[in-house]
Amino acid sequence: MTAPRRVAAAVIQRADGRILLLRRSPTHTSNPGKWCFVTGYIGPDETPLQAVVREVHEELGLAVTPTRAGAVVVVHTDWGATLHVYPFLCPVGDLDAVTLEWEHTAYAWITPGALYEYDFVQQLDDDLRAVGLL
C-alpha cells in the first residue's frame, strides 16, 4: 500500500467573496477537463503553507498570504491513490484577470455556492467546507 500523498490547495478569494475555479487542461495527468483550485504536491522539505504559496506563484504568478488553514481533507481518488489535501484560504483583494499556464485552459470567479454548477474534481467542496466557505 502506498503512503498518502500530501497536496496543498489554494482557495483564492476576491474581496467580493468570489472564488477562483480553474479548468484543468485536457492533457493534465489527473482529472483532465475538470474544475479545481490551485493545487500541488507538498515537497519533502516543505510545510503545507510553503507549498501553497509556491504553487500559487508557479501556476498564476501571484504572491499570496494565506489567512486560514482548513482541516486536512482525505481523498480516495478514482485511480486508487489516497491524498491528504491541506486547504488554505488565500485572499487576493480586487483581482480580476489571472494568467494561466499549461495546466489550466480557463478560469471563472464564482460564488462558493455556485460550485455545484461545475464538473469539479473529487471532494473540492470539502476544501471549501474546511476553510469555512460552504
Image (spheres, helix red, strand yellow):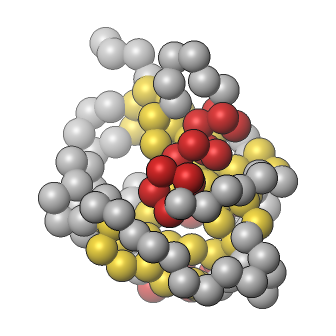
At a point 61% along the width and 86% down the height, the residue shown is 96
In the displayed structure, 45 sits above or below 26; it is: above
Work out which residue is located at the far right of the displayed protein and give it: 67
In the displayed structure, 82 sits above or below 1; it is: below
In terms of depth relative to the viewer, which is nearer, 99 or 49?
A: 99
Q: Is residue 126 visible?
A: no
Q: Is residue 70 visible?
A: yes
Q: Position of residue 65 (x, y in %)?
A: 77, 53
Quadrant housing residue 35: bottom left
Q: Position of residue 34 (x, y in %)?
A: 32, 67
Answer left or right for 38 relative to 104. right
Work out which residue is located at the far left of the displayed protein and give it: 27
Q: How many marks?
A: 0
At a point 78% along the width and 76% down the height, the residue shown is 93
In the displayed structure, 79 sits above or below 5; it is: below
Answer left or right for 83 relative to 88. left
Q: Position of residue 89 (x, y in %)?
A: 73, 57
Quadrant housing residue 26: bottom left
In the displayed structure, 56 sits above or below 115; it is: above
In terms of depth relative to the viewer, which is nearer, 55 or 34?
A: 55
Answer left or right for 19 relative to 16. left
The N terminus, quarter of image:
top left
Answer left or right for 51 relative to 70. left
Q: Position of residue 109 (x, y in %)?
A: 57, 84
At a point 45% along the width and 73% down the height, the residue shown is 99
The C terminus, quarter of image:
bottom right
At a point 67% along the width and 56% down the height, the residue shown is 63
